[in-house]
Image (cartoon, helix red, strand yellow):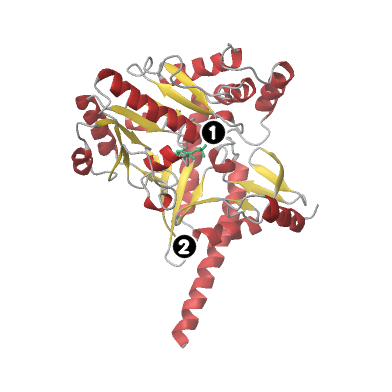
Amino acid sequence: MFFSEIQKLDQQYIAHTYKRMNLDVAAGSGATCTDDAGREYIDFSAGIGVNSIGFTNPAWVEAVKGQIDQLAHISNLYHTKPQIALAKALCERTGMKRVFFANSGAEANEGALKTARKYSSDKYSHERYEIITLVNSFHGRTIATLAATGQDSFHANFGPFPPGFAYAKANDLVDLESKVTEKTCAIFIECIQGEGGVIPLEPGFVKGVEKLCTEKDLLLMVDEVQTGVGRTGRFLCCEHYGIKPDVVTLAKGLGGGLPIGAVLFGEKTQDTLGPGDHGSTFGGNPIVCAGGNAVMESIDGKFLDDVADKGAYIAEKVKAMPGVTGVTGKGLMLGIALEDGLASGQLAADCIAGGLIILTAKEKLRLLPPLTISKAEIDKGLAVLEKVLAAAVKQKQLAQADSGKD
Ligand SMILES: *Cc1c(COP(=O)(O)O)cnc(C)c1O
């Protein structure tokens, strides 16, 4: 099938909820993939941070295939080894106490929101239900996680939303404290706002959030759906900030390419949800967990140091490129701020034409490459990016010179 036919069928049969790029991906290995015509691309996206150990990672493929041969699914009414092993690995890695498995980031966050309300209604009253999130946050696309998302643009057309959310300005403790009332039960943050534009929170603010939570017995909940599982050079991004959350949510990179979400409960919240309070038909599926176990086994101390080093290397190179005004983020979660007049969406499309898959986050370019990306792949991808940026800057200058003549 030619690409033009695929596009036509896509237009006809797929709901138009995505602005698709001009690319169909057919196969991949490491951080390199090919389209149906056999053309190669370097992948700086990992499918939005999902393929954390690369395309067709041999250990991952072996684990998943082995599990398929044994048992594809059994409900959560029964025990399976891959699920227990993944929960144990996550708790040992993070110091959290128990895990609930879901299938996506939004679902993991739904679990966190329910936990906050249950904790507070058990201990205080049903009137203590409000959850504070941050302006410019992103927590998912279900009705409740949209309500939690602190961006008005996501709220148009889908109301009414469930009540019980308040929004505080990031990095503004005074504003945050002013939003805390006798109704508040939790504060829910991303340590680096991902979809919001790869914006790290300030360490002093995050410490202040933790202190406020401790003083008022509010749950400190951290959405690590994008930042977690080694993405920032630590297993959890909140480790950079030295905080101990009561609830952490994970998803994207955890399954290495299979759909998974996880809610990690700390000491305070480990017994909050009991039998019947929450559940999922597919959550913690053995195949998905086998993939997750392969991811967890890959991530040792050296692996995380490499993520930090590769991120620092990329950031330094990118900072020196034309049209770039700054680089934000940590490890292999990077945002590239651009000169006025350079459009991130157009640049991402140009990169694809040049053989590089790259993401955007609002007005920035965004990099979430596989954590296992090689130095050679990084250099190849950066070369495409530099060429695309140089061409765009030159075109912008020509256009400006032209308009100057009139
Ligand atoms: C992607 C993302 C989500 C939503 O995850 P889905 O798997 O798409 O439901 C939630 N929170 C953050 C921080 C994310 O980056």
- The amino acid at mark 2 is Gly
Residue placed farthest to the front in the image? Answer: 160
Position in image of residue 109 (x %, y %) = 43, 32
Q: Is residue 189 left or right of residue 323?
A: left
Q: Is residue 234 visible?
A: no
Position in image of residue 122 (x %, y %) = 30, 18
Alpha carbons under labels 1 and 2: distance apart: 30 Å
- The amino acid at mark 1 is Gly
Instruction: Residue at 47%, 82% (x, y): give it.
Output: 403
Residue placed farthest to the bottom in the image? Answer: 406
Q: Nearer the viewer, mark 1 or mark 2?
A: 1
Residue linked to disc 1: 253
Q: Is residue 72 above or below residue 43?
A: above
Q: Is mark 2 within 8 Å of ligand 1?
A: no
Label 2 SS? loop
Q: Label 1 crowding class (10 Å Cα cut-off): few <14, some 14-19, many 20+? A: many
Of pointers 1 and 2, the one earlier in the residue sequence: 1
Q: Relative to the observer, which residue lies in front, 326 or 218?
A: 218
Q: Which numbered dot is residue 269?
A: none
Q: Is residue 84 above or below residue 364?
A: above
Label 1 SS? helix
Q: Is residue 210 above or below residue 100?
A: below
Specify the quadrant of the image occupied by residue 354. Answer: bottom right
Count of all numbered marks drawn on residues in the image: 2
Q: Relative to the observer, which residue lies in front, 194 or 281?
A: 281
Q: Is residue 169 left or right of residue 108?
A: left
Q: Is residue 247 left or right of residue 385?
A: left
Residue linked to disc 2: 323
